[in-house]
Image (cartoon, rainbow, N blue to C red):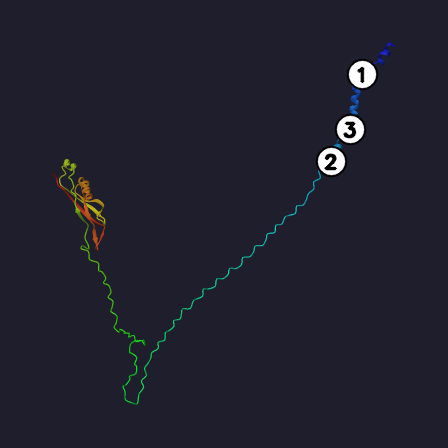
Amino acid sequence: MAKNDKNTFLTTGEKVRSYLGLAFVVSLLLHVVIAPLLPSMNQKTESTKVENVTIEKIKPVVIHTPKPTPTPPPTPTPPPQSTPPPQQQQQQIKVNVVHAHANAGPGPEVQAYKPPANGSEGGVVTTTSTAAPAATEAPATATPAACAVPAKDAQVVNQAQADYPDQATEMNAGNGEVIVLVTVGPQGQLVDASVSKTTNAIFNRNAINAARSSTYSPKVVDCKPTTGQYNFVVDFQAQ
């Protein structure tokens, strides 16, 4: 009997465990029943959230451009009216002519008026010259004066002296001669100088220097200066 009394009374821990088990079973049942209903509820809420969008058709706006006013054609300019030249009125000259009447009785005779051979009716005498006009003499054409020297060769005006080379003195080269061909321009300027003939090359430099230091007159052909050549001869004498 003592054992049966103990089983009928539950302790606090057992009650708690029984309540927890009961709550777990109830939560499972609720989950099984309510879970299928959640998708349909979500769809309803989503359908209610859909906004009604109205599309209005936009009509194109047509802008009517006014037609431009046509430009009137330009008014033609009337041609200038030519003014007729003034008419010169010819003055009529009245001449009183004395008529002669013959009288039966004696009396002085009146001569009839005779117009002059030369002149106008007003009595102004005009003379006309029949002499031929004097012939105009043509101006004389100036003849260019002939030049004093119509043609000549190029010449030396002031010839520079060439020094005897020191090297020729040391080598006892003796006398020598060098011919330098000089080209002279139309203004008498030296254009070129080169050795044409020499007896010893030791004298060439001093000969060319003397040719370049000299002055010349140009060659003349038909009274016109032109380019010409001149043989510049240098004699070297041993001292």
As helix, strand or loop, the secondary structure at mark 3 comes to helix
Image quadrant for the N terminus?
top right
Identified by mark 3, the residue type is Ile
Q: Which residue is mark 1?
A: 15
Work out which quarter of the rendered image holds the C terminus and state it.
top left
Residue 186 horizontal/vertical position (percent): 23, 50
> Mark 1–mark 2 contact, CB under 8 Å?
no
Which disc is residue 34 wearing? 3
Q: Residue furthest top?
A: 2
The residue to which callout 2 is attached is 48
Query: Percent x, y for residue 92?
Result: 36, 75
Q: Which amino acid is tagged 2?
A: Thr
Q: Nearer the viewer, mark 3 or mark 2?
A: 2
**Position of 226 compared to 82: left or right?**
left
Give the Cα separation between the discs numbered 3 and 2. Answer: 21 Å
Q: Quadrant of residue 40?
A: top right
Q: Residue pushed farthest left? A: 239
On screen, residue 13 versus residue 58, left or right, reads right
In this rendered view, identify the residue nearer to me: 99 or 167: 99
Indicate the quadrant where residue 49 lies.
top right
User: Mark 1 or mark 2: which is in front?
Assistant: 2
The spot of residue 145 in percent (x, y) is 20, 58
- Residue 193 position in % (x across, y down): 21, 45
Q: Are marks 3 and 2 in contact (CB under 8 Å)?
A: no
Question: Upstream in the sequence, badge 1 or badge 2?
Answer: 1
